[in-house]
Amino acid sequence: MQADFEVKYLDVRWYDRDTVLSILESFIPLKTEFDSEMQHFICNTVIYPKIDAIKNGRLAFRYLVRNSVAPYFEAADGIRIPLKLILDKESGKEWWVEANAWNADRKDWSSKTYRTAGKLVVVLKDQICQINIGSSEFTIEQLERYLFDFKSDLWELILDETSYVTGEVKVTQEGGVSEASLHLISNILSHAQQILSNPKSELREIQTLKPRKMVKPVTRTFMELTTKGDSRFLTSRATEPSFNVPENRYVLFALQRIYKILNQLVTISRSKINRFESSLDKLNERYNSFSNEKIIDINLVRKDLERLRKSCDLSELNRNLQLKLSQVPSSGVPIKKIYWKIGRELNAGGQYFVGVKEQIDHEWLERGESKNIVVLSFSDSSLKDLFSTGFEYEVDAEFSLKKQVISPESTRYNYTIININSIDILGGSELDNRRNKFFTERDKAVALNSSGWIKMLSSRELTEQDKEKLSIKTRQKHIEEQCRNTKLVYDSLEPKLAKFKEVLVRLRALGVKPSSTFPNSMTFVRNPNYQAIHSGYKNLKELTNLSDEDLLLSLERVDEIGLINMPLLYERWCLLQIIKVLIQQYHYHPDASWKRKLLATINIGRRSEPLSFTNHNVKRSIRLMYEPKLDNGRTPDFVMDVDVEQKNGHTHTNRFVMDAKFYSSDLLQGMGGISRVIDHLYNDKDYSENGQNSVFILHPATNTISDRVSPQSWGKDSFLGELVMFDWDQSLRQKHYHQYGAICANPTSRANYLDEFQRLIGMFLQYGVENNTNGLGTDDAMSYNFCLACGSHDLNHIEKHNSNQKSCWYKCNECNHFTTYNHCLECNTRLIKNGDYWTYHSQMPMEPLNIKCPACESLL
């Protein structure tokens, strides 16, 4: 359902209580989305301080088709608060705003919604819109820095020649500016300064006072003779040079554009330097944090011990078993008791090798020293879910038995359970194993408690740590070189800004007005200085990938964006970070028209053309869509369709859905917390399309993971679906691990936010496109391998030093990052270890360098 209205922020200036002097409206309307369950529209925003050009931003509503029905706020008690109609004389638009009370001193209508968080219901004729107003957790300085970074990132993606814009890498400085560009800018400046020493001009006739004997009379001269008589000075014809000629007007226009590009190159270089220095600080912090001991999170240990205790608590197991049984149809009438010992599952599935006896004190009839075979199957698959390998059960059930004589010494007994009235676990080898595991882990915890929860690392753990330290050192050297080269570019360009500005000021002082029209003049043929400005401007646009004039105009329009529409700006910012990770971290090549499509999305939005990216080295291609419509009619913010070619030549497509939510912590908690928001998008709104897609939320709120499950540094703010965390995801765990979650993508956390995007997207490109389920012959990926830390495909498949023949080890030849492809000993699920920092699986609390299986959560 489409909204018949739009919502914006306005800065309204009043002459009196009924007269509007001017209206300044926000750049883009707030996003409204129809909630089919609530049958009304929802719009999310936050309260704001005084920022940007909008000094007193107030919510305003406008019918898209002229309508005389006055909208109103509806309070919780049913009271209607009418809105005031105002007219923007320049645009002719009619807006409805809150006019709570007139302040004669400030000449302004007060607005409670400006600084009030909560829910607001607006009735606009036949449609209702609920405005969710959250409190802002950013300071004004942080918001302004966020907006600056957004614009800088966009310019960087457009201008940076190291972004594989055509599929062919140009020779550039690491700072993103070619040597030719640096020389060209210096050359343009030199010629501009020479033009100022002798600018082209033309004589234009004027009238001025001159001594009587030097006068060249005009009509006014004769009038003065008749009125002034013997005056010493009379009006005369004269000439003066004018510099506002077409050639200079075009030169001023070109130099203004060159200055704009140069200013952005300097800004990008400065932003890169800050980013590199932050990355180096972060890497130094990570490197210095390594030691031969580890602080253990006591809360996670307690949580693991409680889970292990419950897994071997017979009463707890039977209580859960009765809950499962209640979901299975049963007559409730006692049938016949029988005892089962569940062995391994047959390869065909749906059947178990079992032991059976009719009395508890009888011997088991099972395959052992005898050659008999006993197999248990089920008439209904729901009955099979009540049994697990390694447990012994007492079952009141209806069953059938078929005997098959295989040989004189061997008989096959085929039992089929038809109906179950009651079931209880009595014991079994699996229960003993769980108890032993619990006692072992409990003893470790007792030992750690006596040592103050400080664990000394084992030799194997120290070896793993040394691998990560080597990777960090290699990464540091690479970033230091990038930073050094970027500083050279910055030091070369930054001093030229002031000189270009001086040239512009002097040209304007000569009365020159800019014009984009190139004059048909021989000056640009005969005068090498004018010729150099024209050709230099064209060459600079080519070198900086801005030969298309529309790109510059679109970028200039982006520069006009203010802070007032933060949720929409956050979506656009997230889009840029996704693209930066794909291009700069994972080396995907965008298609030829990507810049035009990106700027159209930034400026217009709403289902623009998909952006296509390809990495031929790893045989993957991506279609990144903004606000596409799914087959079920839903419109998430971002959808990545990844086409993957496997090593065996087979191809398949996987879909990754991301939704950006500019929620403050209080608004997030008011919506039921991160668990409810994920549940709503994954299940209720079905962004997963019946469990087929991975769905993740991007949000800036910190401290949203109230029940942390992973000891890694990212575990306090992000959840990557690595373990069971919510009540509703228990039933999804076996098949949908790492398929839903949320990351804290906070634009003001300069040292971490891009790593959050990289880990999330890398997880999907490495793990999410794989079939990680049971029955794998090897744990090496079926798709082409790449390094999660730096994106390189140049990996060395190294020889293993353990007894596990299925596992595979890879080392990145560029950054020395070490990756292990392994499998779960319990359920055979593939696991990929990417070191302490980049691993997206949860680590074990008491053995930090080992991981837990995301499917069965076994401690490995």
Image (spheres, rainbow, N blue to C red):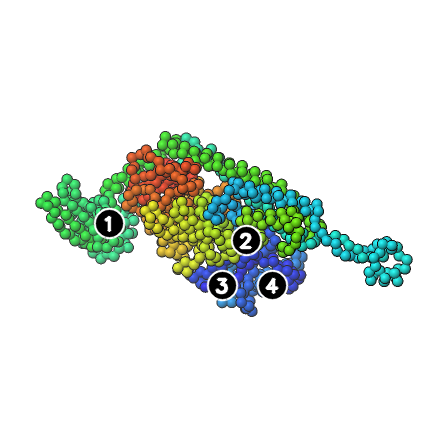
Say which of 241 and 145 sits in front: 241
Say which of 537 and 56 sits in front: 537
Kindly identify the amino acid type of the residue bearing the numbered disc 3. Ala
Q: Nearer the viewer, mark 2 or mark 3?
A: 2
* Mark 3 element type: loop
Q: Nearer the viewer, mark 1 or mark 2?
A: 2
Marks 3 and 4: in contact by CB < 8 Å?
no
Quadrant in which the C terminus is drawn: top left
Q: Earlier in the sequence, mark 2 or mark 3?
A: 3
- Local packing at callout 4 (Cα closer than 10 Å; few below 14, some 14-19, many 20+) is few
User: What x and y, as percent, mark residue 798?
Assistant: 35, 36
- Local packing at callout 3 (Cα closer than 10 Å; few below 14, some 14-19, many 20+) is some
Q: Nearer the viewer, mark 4 or mark 2?
A: 2
| Dot label at residue 349 | 1
Q: Is residue 367 left or right of residue 172?
A: left
| Dot label at residue 548 | 2
User: What x and y, as percent, mark residue 256?
Assistant: 63, 50
Q: Earlier in the sequence, mark 4 or mark 3?
A: 3
